[in-house]
Image (cartoon, grey):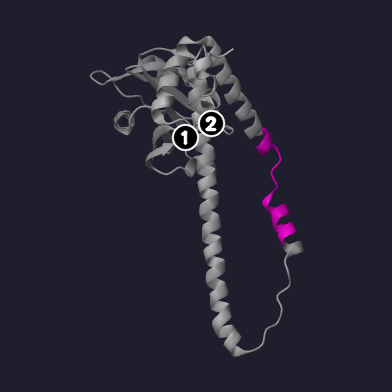
Amino acid sequence: MACEQWREQLDAYADGELDSTQASVLAKHLPGCASCAADVLQRVQMKRSVQMAGKRYTASAEFRNRIARSIAAKPSRQRGSLWQILVVPALAVLILSVGVNFYAGRESVRRQRVYSELADLHVSALASATPVDVISTDRHTVKPWFEGKIPFSFNLPELQGSPFTLLGGRVTYLGQAPGAHLIYQMRKHEVSAFIFQDRREEIASLPSGPVHALSFNAESWTQNGLRYVVFGDVSPDDIHALSKLLRDAG
């Protein structure tokens, strides 16, 4: 049973709906409370199961096009040059506007889905009793551990003189794409750094630069064919500082 003081906030935390201050306080509470951590982990696993189930049966583009053609109304013949001059251009503008808005809406939904999955990975790692599979502060130990486990390599920065400490890493998946999940500590906060190949449509849809998503701050960029995302409840300046270290190492 979760602590009474946190019970009403666990669902909002798992869904990324708490403000940054509340999310930060609860994130500090989780490592020391097995009950709350287990409840949060259960919620995140349920969300990921629902997401995977929703992707299991997706209509193919050919099927969607066939259905669209079958229900499309046949264009009727129109007469009159005035109708053509006034109405046809207006319809063209309307169709173009709808198309642009539809595409932008799809991109926004896709990005939100990716950020939601990254938030789930970050939260579940913090709530887990074993957040990393390779435990080491030495980049020369962590980097070789990933060899043969993911289909790419990457470089890690030297952290001496910085406020960050490498805690370790684990193999993770975004959709079906394997990647590296590194966890850094800054003061009493944990920050996730995700690295994936920048090939899948979902990952490539992420905008470069800093964003605020689901109560967390994040920064994303591409480098050497890889997509990096730094994610956590620290300030945007702290996220940027770790991002710069990773970029410079690449």
Horizontal and vertical percent position of residue 26: 45, 20
Q: Is residue 84 above or below residue 102?
A: below
Horizontal and vertical percent position of residue 121: 51, 26
Left or right of 63? Residue 51 is left
Horizontal and vertical percent position of residue 119: 49, 30
Left or right of 237? Residue 48 is right
Tell me the distance, in whole angstroms, between the alpha carbons under discs 2 and 1: 7 Å
**Picture quadrant where residue 189 is located:** top left
Q: Residue furthest left?
A: 161
Q: Is residue 39 above or below residue 198?
A: above
Would you say the residues marked 2 and 1 are in contact, meaning their CB atoms lie under 8 Å apart? yes
Q: Which mark is residue 90?
A: none
Q: Residue at x 35, y 27 (%)?
A: 234
The front one of 74 and 123 is: 123
Q: Is residue 58 magenta?
A: yes
Which amino acid, mark 2? Asp
Q: Nearer the N terminus, badge 2 or badge 1?
A: 2
Q: Residue at x 70, y 82 (%)?
A: 77
Q: Is residue 92 magenta?
A: no
Number of marks in the rendered image: 2
| Region of the chain picked out in magenta, as a range | 53-68
Left or right of 250? Residue 123 is right
Tag 1 secondary structure: loop
* Residue position marked by numbered label 2 in the rendering: 15
Q: Is residue 130 visible?
A: yes
Q: Is residue 150 visible?
A: no
Q: Is residue 34 above or below residue 82?
A: above
Q: Residue furthest front?
A: 4
Q: Is residue 199 above or below residue 84?
A: above
Query: Magenta span: helix, strand or loop, mainly?
Result: helix
* Residue position marked by numbered label 1 in the rendering: 214
Q: Residues within 10 Å of mark 2 (few under 14, many from 20)?
A: some
